[in-house]
Amino acid sequence: MNKDGVSGAVVEGASVQGTGLIKGASIEGVPVESLLMMVLLTLLAVITIAIVRQRNMFGVVMLASIYSFLMASVMMVLDAVDVAMTEASVGAGISTVILLATLHLTKSVEYPQVRGVIIPIFVSVVVGAALIWGTMSLPPFGIVDAPVHMHTAPTYLAASRDHLAPPNMVTSVLADYRSFDTLGETAVIFTAGIGVLMLLKGRRRKMLGESEGQGDRGGEA
Amino acid sequence: MDQLKVFVTHYNYFITIFLMVAGLYIVIARGNMIKKLIGLSLFQTSVYLLYLSAGKIVGGTAPIYDPAFKFYSNPLPHVLILTAIVVGVSTFALGLALVVRIHEAYGTVEEDEIFAKDDGA
Amino acid sequence: MKLDVILRVGTKLVLPFILLFAFYVQFHGDYGPGGGFQAGVIAAGMVILYAIIFGLKAAQRVIPQELVQVMIPLGVLVYAGTGVVSMLLGYKFLEYTGFAQKFLTAHEWGILFVELGVFITVSGTMSAMFYAFVGRGR
């Protein structure tokens, strides 16, 4: 059933006109990668439910790390190799380490269930329903003539083909076509970095619960 | 058959929405600030998935040019998400640094206890 | 900090290859998956692995805290400086065409410098963040 549905979504044997891609070529539908991705996405949803329900914070951090690796696998299947590499090293590496350091600093192990769940579930269901309603008009997944492929992507591909840009289109877009963007992102990373240093580099003060030998809590931000 | 087809071809978007809503639920329903930040990063990750799903061509390949291939996924979402991930982890660390400072000031990271201490002080 | 001897020796064996992989990802970014962001994070991962196995003090002897803190603004400076140099050559900000005779070569030089700036900032920020979080606990 899956096989039929997915290959039906691809314009089978049709020549792609007006996309700027190589004309006259055809795609044979490859349902295997769609099937693989559906399995990975289902696993992702299961891990998400586990994150929501888990109350032990160490468990949550480990599940978040597993989530990042699964997400990197999904990105791999979605052909985003650069992004998959970043997600695997950032999501599963750096953010797990920083989360564990925070758990060590805050000694937050387990938290009680104190809040009502009716309102959050209501809000979530309403938002989810609205988003699903909005999703129905999106083009089917993976088709070659979706509007998103019509505009700038053929330019990047043509530049790489004609040896005006490096073969890796992601690098050429990141550092050449959109280098202003990347400069801004680098500035954001710089700002976040000095923000963390300003927050954490100062002298450590006594906690509220401990005996206050220094008594300088009034200055805390 | 038609509805099954819609379900299969929009499965990515449904999972994206599920992840986004789960992140939203964590942010609203959980009082622990670290868990709230993890919920925010779930929310953020679902946006990555949305962008990358839109850029994918089934049967295409990664956007690295080689004469042997004819169809490539759209490189533009990849660029946007690539920078978003690294910026996301930087801001996530900034949020965790704030949580550490809040813990040093209040001795807890539970939102309700912090409010109670503020009211009592 | 005395951990298992296998961990310590194994880490020492693996560390140079992690750094080598980071540089491969950095400089091969034009032809394969990779670039400054990924390479920076991988290089920071090397610092973190060393600090986890040998302790924060030992890691800060190898890669001093002052160095990573200087790297945070230095990368942005390298990036913006590339743009200023391209302006001095008579082109627009961050237009690399003036860097060499051939169009593709010029743009590859520009991408190289820009990615170098990204690498410096990202690896410096990630290492400095790790040092700040772990150093807070002592």
Image (cartoon, coloured by chain):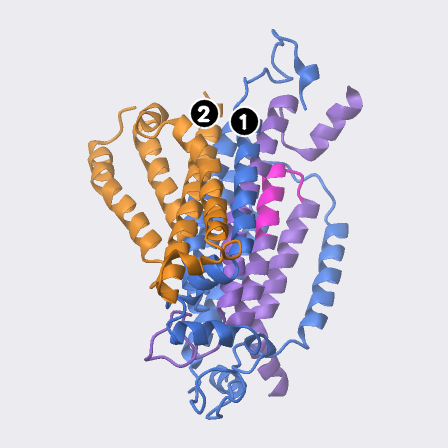
Chain colours: A blue, B purple, C orange
Q: Position of residue B11 (x, y in %)?
A: 57, 72
Disc 2 marks a residue whose amino acid type is Gly
Q: Position of residue B18 (x, y in %)?
A: 62, 62
To which quarter of the image does residue A187 belong? top right
Tell me which segment is drawn in magenta. Answer: B30-42
Residue A135 in the figure: left or right of residue C115? right
Tag 1 subunit: A
Considering depth in this image, is C90 or B68 the residue closer to the camera? C90
The residue tagged 1 is A200
Tag 2 subunit: C
To which quarter of the image does residue C55 belong? top left
Q: Which residue is drawn at the image coordinates 71% and 57% (left, top)? A: A124
The residue tagged 2 is C135
* Labels in figure, total: 2
Task: Confirm whether residue B78 shows in the render.
Answer: yes
To which quarter of the image does residue C27 belong? bottom left
Task: Confirm whether residue C33 shows in the render.
Answer: no
Tell me if label 2 and label 1 are in contact, CB under 8 Å: yes
Q: Looking at the picture, do discs 2 and 1 lie on one chain?
A: no
Q: Disc 2 on helix, strand or loop?
A: helix
Magenta stretch contains residue B68: no
Q: Which mark is residue A59?
A: none
Q: Position of residue A125 (x, y in %)?
A: 72, 61
Magenta stretch contains residue B37: yes
Considering depth in this image, is B82 or B66 the residue closer to the camera? B66
